[in-house]
Amino acid sequence: PYRHKKKYPITISTVQTFLHAKGYGRLIEDQFRFGLVIADEVHELVAPEFIRVFSLWSPLSWLGLTATPKRPDEREFLAYRILGPVVARLKADQMRPIVKWIDTGFVVPDKLANSKYPRHWVWNKLLSMMIEDEDRIEVIIKNVMQDIDNGRLVAVVGERTQLLRKIHERLTRDGYDVAYADGTVPKARRKKIYEDMARGIKYRCLCAGKVLDAMVSIKPLDCLHLITPVAAEHRVMQIFGRTRRPNEGKLVPLVRYYVDEGGQLSGAFRKVAAVVQREGWVVEQADRGPGLAGMGRWKQKPRQETLF
């Protein structure tokens, strides 16, 4: 417990420890106590509550860590004002994925593409429509089955639990050994699923929500299906990274991104495509189709043999 801090030279804590009334008192009491403060995931530091905590500490040295220093809202400057600028960049060995754009045929209705409603309302409405689009779901299921049959260890990742559950139920009904994990599944159970998959004991496929964004490591995972659009660059890097960890005997990672057309969905795809192009990842099956309207300025990189 934090109250025992004086017994030990190192204190490990969460920011939430200092957010309530009692925690604020701790913050004032200890603002000059620490010689070094190490903050992980500092791109999240820009939240008002986090700024309040970090701006009151006065250590001799700061060390901030993050894999995604740039934010889509460009508010990373708030972290820089507290911690200082980026002074070192480390790059871990990661495998280079093959990325396949999958045209779903889902098109945003004109009334939503040109809607005056708030963007977040339209976004949620579109995700709800995807849950009811049986043709789109069928495209996903067929591709997942193909990858499992080809010996891939697959993760199906999306934002909507209803959509993930539909896919999980269908795959299970068709005889595939599939695990399911979201925030409603107890943490201990999720940990057991990840460990079993990593050891090859059970499951060839995992249907997962945002819990897979956290510090989840399944090194043999070599295939990712992104079944709902991703609009933030840092999330693209985080989610793609789940398949890129080197592991003995691992196949070249394969990422299938399901592309929808119109409005915000085309915009989200262009952001993902820009990240893929910038990183120089291999693109296959980049055929133009109804869902690939955003590919006009895309220049496909030549296939490269190196995996890293």
Image (cartoon, rainbow, N blue to C red):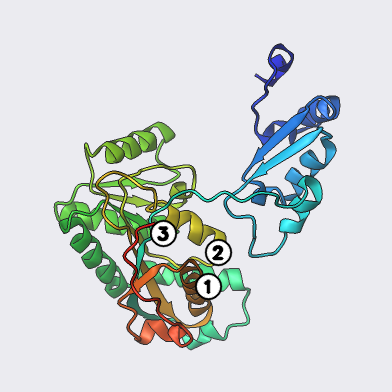
Left or right? Give the position of 247 relative to 148: right
Q: Amino acid at mark 1?
A: Lys
When the figure is inspected, residue 117 is found, relative to residue 181, above or below; the finding is below
Between 179 and 297, the one lying in front of the other is: 297
Question: Looking at the rendering, which quadrant does residue 167 occupy?
Answer: bottom left
Q: Earlier in the sequence, mark 3 or mark 2?
A: 3
Left or right? Give the position of 244 relative to 169: right
Residue 290: percent from left, percent from top:
36, 86
Question: Which residue occupies 52% across, 51% down?
Answer: 91
Determine the CA span between mark 3 and mark 1: 17 Å
Q: Which residue carries the number 3 mark?
A: 158
Label annotation for residue 96: none
Question: Which residue occupies 23% across, 39% down?
Answer: 200
When the figure is inspected, residue 113 is found, relative to residue 57, above or below; the finding is below
Residue 61: percent from left, percent from top:
78, 35
Determine the CA span between mark 1 and mark 2: 7 Å
Q: Residues within 10 Å of mark 3 (few under 14, many from 20)?
A: many
Q: Residues within 10 Å of mark 1 (few under 14, many from 20)?
A: some
Question: Looking at the rendering, which quadrant does residue 248 occupy?
Answer: top left
Q: Which residue carries the number 1 mark?
A: 271
